Image: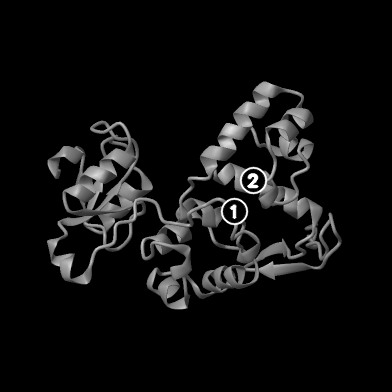
Amino acid sequence: MTKTIVPPTNCPSCNSILDWINDQLFCMNETCPAKNSKQVEHFAKALKIKGLGPKTVEKLDLDSINKIYDIDFNYIEKQLGSSKLAEKLVNEIEKSKSSSLQTLLPAFSIPLFGRSAAEKLCSKIEYLSEINHDVCKEAGLGQKVTDNLMEWLIMTFNQYADLPFSWKVENYKWVAEEDLELVKGTVCISGKLNSFKTKALATEKLQEAGYVVKSSLTKDVTILVNESGIESAKTKKAIQNNIKIINNLNEII
């Protein structure tokens, strides 16, 4: 006999009515304790803030993202009982302040808006203030994703506006329309590099050489760099779309 699974109607933490969004249940209560602590955990994980896991979030009583940047060394040391742990966490929080827009946006738990959507969107803009419905459409975002993002920008972003971020796209290089003919191509890097120590350095050299660099394999990418030799999802997609693949970045610089 097959059992019928009845989905919950109320949040188990705050008892608010749950909303169905694209076959997923969401608690929309902004003061829900469980939701807020999970948002902090997700944010810390997305920004790679080491040492800020569930137990530490609980010990530090972090019930909002803003509080991450309000706490100081003395408070952390007192709550964790360790100056060493406090120093490490303070350094991690400080490092997170340089996070790019494509890393930040998915960190705010906007329904259906993940890293892939952020990469697509950030290939079309430089700053957060440039986001609108037309840009989202141009980036290929679906209507529901766009609606969720725009609602977040209008209704929620103000509470985060003063956080210590530039709200800028990483490695953005604006190309004037009249200079497009001078662009040699659009490059995407897949996996680890052998020819450069970091992707940031490789990106800088590519831009100096006249290339536009994208972090995701968008439709305008003309060259995929795969020095690792691993057949990633990007590599498979590049093969399907007849995009040139090279295994040594120095071939084009």
The residue tagged 2 is 69
Residue 238 in picture, x, y percent from top left: 27, 53
Residue 80 in picture, x, y percent from top left: 75, 28
Q: Which mark is residue 113?
A: none
Give the residue drawn at x 68%, y 45%: 70
Eyeballing the image, is 18 above or below 170? Answer: below
Give the residue drawn at x 49%, y 51%: 103
What's the colour scheme? Answer: one colour
**Element type at marker 2?**
loop
Residue 44 occupies which quadrant of the picture? Answer: top right
Residue 190 in picture, x, y percent from top left: 32, 44
Q: Is residue 148 left or right of residue 141?
A: right
User: Is there a contact, CB below 8 Å, between mark 2 and mark 1?
Assistant: yes
**Element type at marker 1?**
loop
Q: Is residue 76 left or right of residue 197?
A: right
| Mark 1 burial class by Cα count in 10 Å: few <14, some 14-19, many 20+ | some
Can residue 49 be seen from the camera position used here? no
The residue tagged 1 is 163
Quadrant placement of the N terminus: bottom right
Quadrant placement of the C terminus: top left
Kindly give the residue lying farthest to the bottom in the view shown: 134
